[in-house]
Image (cartoon, rainbow, N blue to C red):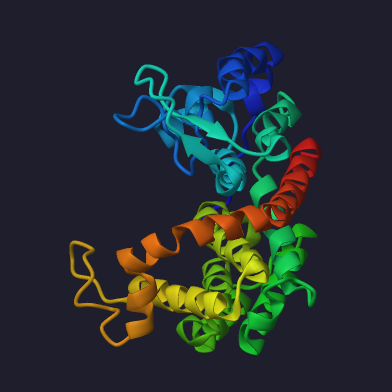
Amino acid sequence: MSAPASLQAFGGDPAAKARLLERVRAPWIARALVPDVSLNWKRDGVPDSLSGTLAETQDRATFVERTGIPVDLALLCETLIVPCVKKTDTGDDATGPSIEGAESVLSFGLEWLDAVQPGAELGMVVPRFARHCLEMLLRPDFALAPHISADFRAVGLQIAALWDRELAGETPARDEWRRVRKAALAAKANETPIWGYRIATLLEAVAWPVHSISGEFISVFATFLFTWLMFLETAYMTEQECRDREHMLIGWRAMAIAPRDEAGNIDGDPLEFLPESQRVMSMEYITQTMERTMAVRDAARGQKEQAIRGLMDTMFRLIQGA
């Protein structure tokens, strides 16, 4: 893993910023761009994304060259928007789908871009955001705190301590990082409480120097965020619905850790000995519970949007301060 190279946002040119943002401002306000965790631009059957349209590319290196913005930062900002957006079919093949969502969330699409100052070096924004997230999930009042094993909490605290030393200008010895990674493996993510599994895998993935984790952080953060938001919905569920949700997560974990062949296909049936997971992951169950699932999502929407907006505000401040 290597440290992020120094970049100047928009090449230090205010006119370049204005030109690039002009591409996305009107279509974003019209809700004609669909946020995604990938750069989407002129892909067959896939609507254009905000970042893909900004640089008119689906290539990561080209995005960086044209914008001076780390691509991982741009995609992380879209990752924050994705969970609270509903894609709707306009019925017009020429214009494609549109999106719906709370204005407090959708407004972030342009807020973060407007906050980027031409010439700003943004390479440390994602690492500092990762440090914020680590602090958040290690707090005793965090929603998923009871589901984080003691071993992984200890790993998280060790990572935080090493990151803080790095951010203060120190360079921890490689042996210190090796010990943390060894502790993470010994903590056994696959055996953690099911609601804490994605936190455990996040901690395993980021047990590296803070300057080097931007690319790895996004994918594990996205799955952690999805799990956190799913957990917030349980406050509006019955006890049986909560148990069913846990069985669904158990099934997902079984599929995630199942052995795969050289082509990446799952070898065997990971749900063979998980009948309850089979039940809640069946099309019959999903169809029967669809209406109730949507009602729960609607009930939890405000709480989830508040959580997302808090993360967006942190990201906004980090970009402003870069």
Q: Residue at x 34, y 72 (%)?
A: 255
Establish if 29 lies above or below 183. Answer: above
Provide residue 93's location: percent of width, then percent of height: 34, 21
* Foreground residue among 134 and 49: 49
Residue closest to the eye, 194 or 1: 194
Image quadrant where residue 61 sits: top left
Residue 150 in the image: state x and y as whole percent: 66, 88
Residue 40 appears in the picture as rendered: yes
Identify the residue shown where x is 65% and y is 49%: 126
Which of the image's four quarters has the C terminus? top right
Percent from the top left, x then y, of residue 122?
67, 39
Q: Is residue 9 left or right of residue 135?
A: left
Q: Residue at x 55, y 57 (%)?
A: 217
Picture residue at 49% right of the left edge, 24% below the top: 53
The number of numbered discs placed on residues in the rendered structure image is: 0
Q: Can residue 213 be seen?
A: no
* Nearer to the camera, 153 or 99: 99
Above or below 229: residue 245 = below
Residue 81 against residue 163 in the figure, above or below: above
Q: Quadrant of residue 206?
A: bottom right
Q: Is residue 167 left or right of residue 194?
A: right
Locate residue 78 relative to residue 168 in the image: left or right: left
